[in-house]
Amino acid sequence: MSSTASHHALLPQELIRLKRDSQPLPAEEINAFVQGIADDRISDAQIGAFTMAVFLNGMSREEVVALTTATRDSGHVMQWDSLNLPGPIVDKHSTGGVGDLVSLVLGPWVAACGAFVPMISGRGLGHTGGTLDKLESIPGYDPYPTPERFSDIVKSTGVAIIGQTGNLAPADKRIYGVRDVTATVESIPLITASILGKKLASGLDALVMDVKVGSGAFMPTPEKSRELAKSIANVATQAGTPTTALLTDMSQPLAPCAGNAVEIVETLALLRGERANSRVMQVTRELAVEMLIAGKLVTSREEALTKLEKALTSGAAAEVFSRMVRELGGPADFMERPDSYLATAPVIQAVHPEQGGIVQRIDTRAVGMSVVELGGGRLRNDASVDHSVGFSDIAEIGDRVDNQRPLAIVHARSEEAAARATAQLRAAMTLGEEAAVADTLLQDTFRGEA
Ligand code: URA
C-alpha cells in the first residue's frame, strides 16, 4: 500500500466504481469508507450502491478482513488487559435458532472452568429467539449495566450476558439498516463483516461460532451455512481472534421448548446437570470444548471434557449463573425458587396430533414464527415480549405422538391464541409411519486459518 493512500482516500464513488468493476479494494480505502459511514460523511445511497456491488461481485478474503476490522474499529473496542484477568476472554456467537438456549448454559459453564465471557447478546430476530428476551423473563435482570459495571461483573463472576450499547460498531448499524431495505442482506462477505465487526469489538482472545443448518437456520441451504462457517472462522482468525466455527443441526428445535420463561426453566435444569446428554447439551458441550481449547485453558479434548464434567456436577456452573443473575439485578434466590419469579401463561394445554404417528420432519422456522405470534417475539421492533408464552415438551424427530403423547404443550395468553398455535404446530410437524432419525447434530468443524 502506498503511504499516500491513507492521506488521499478515494472519493466514495470511486471506491464503489472499483467494486462495481470487480477491481480489488485496498484495505486502507475500505477503512476510510467505513470510517466515513460511521461519521455520516457517506450517504445511504452510497452505502446501498456499495453493498449491492459487493452482493453481486463478492469480496476477496483480504477485503472481508479489512471490512471486518474497519467495522470493529468504527466504535468502542473493549480492552481487558488492564484488569489482568487470570484467564482468557472468550465468547460464542450463533446464527440463531429455535429452542437455542445454548448461550445461557455455555457462558456460566466455561466461566466456571476459568474463562471470562463478556457476552453481548441480541433480541429475537425473525423466527429465532433472543438470549436477551429470555433473560428478561427474570424479574429485575438489567441487561444494560454501565461499561464499568459490566467489566466488574465479568471480572468477579466470569460471565455477564448483556445487550448491545450505543457505540459498538456504529458503522454496522448504518450498513445493516441500508442492507435491510436494498435486498443486500444475503451476502456472505457482508454477513461475515457484520457479525464479526460487532463481536470482535468485545476484545476477545478467542471466539467460537455456531452456524446452524436445517429448516430453522438463518442461511437458506446447507451449502451456504457451510460457506458462512468457513468465512467466519478464517476472517476472524485473520483479523487476530482465533476462531472455530461449528456447523450444527437446526432441523428441529434444539431444546424441547421454545419461548422465553420456558427456556429459562430448561436452562436451570440443564445447569443442575439434568439431561446431560440431551441434544442441546451435546451442542453446548462441543462449543465449550472448543472455547476451552482456543482459550488455552486445556490442551486436549479429553482434558476439556473432564473439566466441564466437574464444573457441572459440582454445581459450579449453576452457581456462576446464579451469581450473574444477582449481579445484574435479578433475585438472589432465583435458582432456588424460579417458580415464584417466572411468569406463567393463563392457558397451558397439550397439543395432540389429529392422527397419531412418528415425527418425520419439523418446519422449525414455522415453530419459531408460531412462538412469535403467541407474543413470545416481536412483529414490530418496538413491541414488547410476553415472557410466559411458547411451547414446552416439544416432541423430537423419531418420537411417536398420539392422543397420549402430545406434539408439545402450548403456553398462551388466551384460548384463541392457543387454538391458532395448535393448528400451526400440527402443520409444522410431518408425521408418518416409518422410523425417523434426526440429522447429525455436529456436522462439521472449521478451525480458522491464519
Ligand atoms: N446478523 C448480523 O448481525 N448481521 C448480518 O448481516 C446477518 C445476521
Image: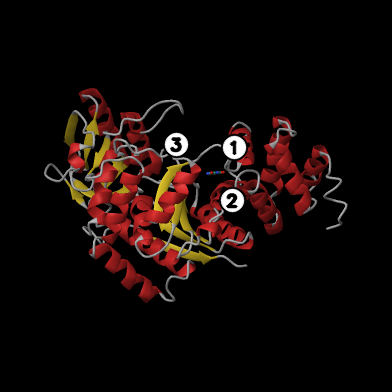
Q: Is mark 2 within 8 Å of ligand 1?
A: no
Q: CA distance from mark 2 to mark 1?
A: 14 Å
Mark number displayed over residue 192: 2
Residue 28 makes an appearance in the image: yes
Circle 2: is it few (<14), some (14-19), or many (20+) Cα within 10 Å? many
- Percent from the top left, x then y, of residue 104? 35, 50
The amino acid marked with disc number 1 is Lys
Mark number displayed over residue 126: 3
Q: Earlier in the sequence, mark 3 or mark 1?
A: 3
Mark number displayed over residue 402: none
Q: CA distance from mark 3 to mark 1?
A: 17 Å
The structure residue drawn at horizontal position 45% and vertical position 70%, both measured from the top left corner, is 293
Q: Earlier in the sequence, mark 3 or mark 2?
A: 3
The structure residue drawn at horizontal position 18% and vertical position 33%, both measured from the top left corner, is 348
Q: Is mark 1 within 8 Å of ligand 1?
A: no
| Label tally | 3
Which marked residue is nearer to the observer: mark 3 or mark 1? 1
Which marked residue is nearer to the observer: mark 2 or mark 1? 1
